[in-house]
Amino acid sequence: MKKISLFLTLALSVSAVFAQKGKVTSAETLMASGDIMKAKEAIDQAVASEKSNTWPKTYIMAAKVYSELDKKGKDDQGTIKAFEFYKKAIELDEKGDAKGKKVGKYKKEIGQSLLFFSGELTNDGVDAFNKENFKDAVTAFEDLLAINSHPYMIELQGEKVDTSIIFNTALAAYNGEMWEEAEKYFNQSVDYKYGGGDAILLLQQVHTATGDSAKMGPNLIKGFETYPEDDRILTSLINFYLESNQNDKALNYLNKAIEGDKDNPSFYYARGVLNDNSGEFEAALADYNKCLEIDTEYFNALYNIGVMYFNKGVEEMNLANEETDFKKFEAKKEAAEGTFKESLPFFERALSVKPEEVAVLESLKTLYYRFEMNDKYKEVNDKLKSL
């Protein structure tokens, strides 16, 4: 009787195991038939049971069910729960059975499931971002990055770095004022050279928000070295040095850059802007002209020289208007008019590089009116109206 009793106990035990594993199969069948709530009921029982909650397949199915619940609006945290189920499935699959065997048996199935699931995570992240639920967006994007970097996925699709998701994670964190996460992912974007100057400037805003001034200078320097044509970074770098009274440091940095690359017009332009902002007219003019020697169509150098002469003409005209002696007034006025004329060819060259640049057209309109160049005045005025 004892042997029979023991046999019956074992039989019942095995039946219980199969009964609980059958819940997983039932969940799969019910989900396929469209009865997602019944599928949830079945898989919840399987997850809760000690007879089946050490089986990777249970969690693979649970992930699919909860992912579907999210899509159907039955559980707005379904995707997040699904990701946790996938992690549990991987954990169990890497461990194997009680005897340490069957390690990785479900690797391919999990990898393929994650491949489809990654699209759902992307959609969830984008949807949360658009609804300004930035915390959930960060969670979804971070989960997606974790999936893409997991060995199961790498084995299936090769090593993949989704730089757009890294940048979007940073943006979501930035908008949600999650500064630590924003810094982490913007730094990664910068390292991968994704996001261009935007990544640098947004990272700068993070440093500003957290008051981490020690990182501001190095970030902008790295940005300028990586994107020398991005005037926003250049302007930010110069303003940073000016605001922190580090003009000498800025000039030293640019001088070293020029020594290392004498044919880079951007470096001369950068030094020209710094001298320009410091009121060093002749030094700025020399740097801008050097920039134009190397690149005759460097728009910003052309435009800035035009602005320098124009502003100098305004200053000279103001001084002339203060003069009470008529002859001295006339002499100073004539000198001012000559300075205004100096700006004309630079604005015209700038316009040839960017024919629809409003700031240049407005400047030329003012000058053509001043010098009664009526045909040219009409031409630029008509163009401005058309824009």
Image: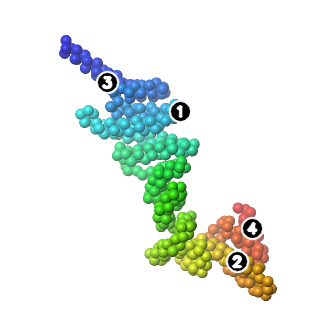
How far across and how far down the image is residue 283, in percent? 57, 79
The disc label shown at residue 381, or none = 4
Element class at badge 3 = helix
How far from the left and from the top, in percent, is residue 36? Answer: 48, 28
Q: Are marks 4 and 2 in contact (CB under 8 Å)?
A: no
**Residue 29 visible here:** no
Image coords of residue 315 (percent x, y):
70, 77
The residue indicated by pointer 2 is 315
Q: CA distance from mark 3 to mark 2?
A: 91 Å
Quarter of the rendering occupied by the C terminus? bottom right
For badge 1, the amino acid type reads: Gly
Measure the alpha-carbon separation of dots 4 and 3: 85 Å
Identify which amino acid the numbered label 2 is placed on.
Answer: Glu
Instruction: Determine whether the residue tagged by mark 1 lies in a helix, strand or loop.
Output: loop
Note whether 110 is above or below 47 in the view shown.
below
Query: Which tag is nearer the camera, tag 4 or tag 3?
Result: 3
Q: Which residue is mark 3?
A: 17
Q: Mark 1 = which residue?
A: 73
* Mark 1 or 2: the one toward you: 2
Q: Say the numbered circle drawn on residue 207.
A: none
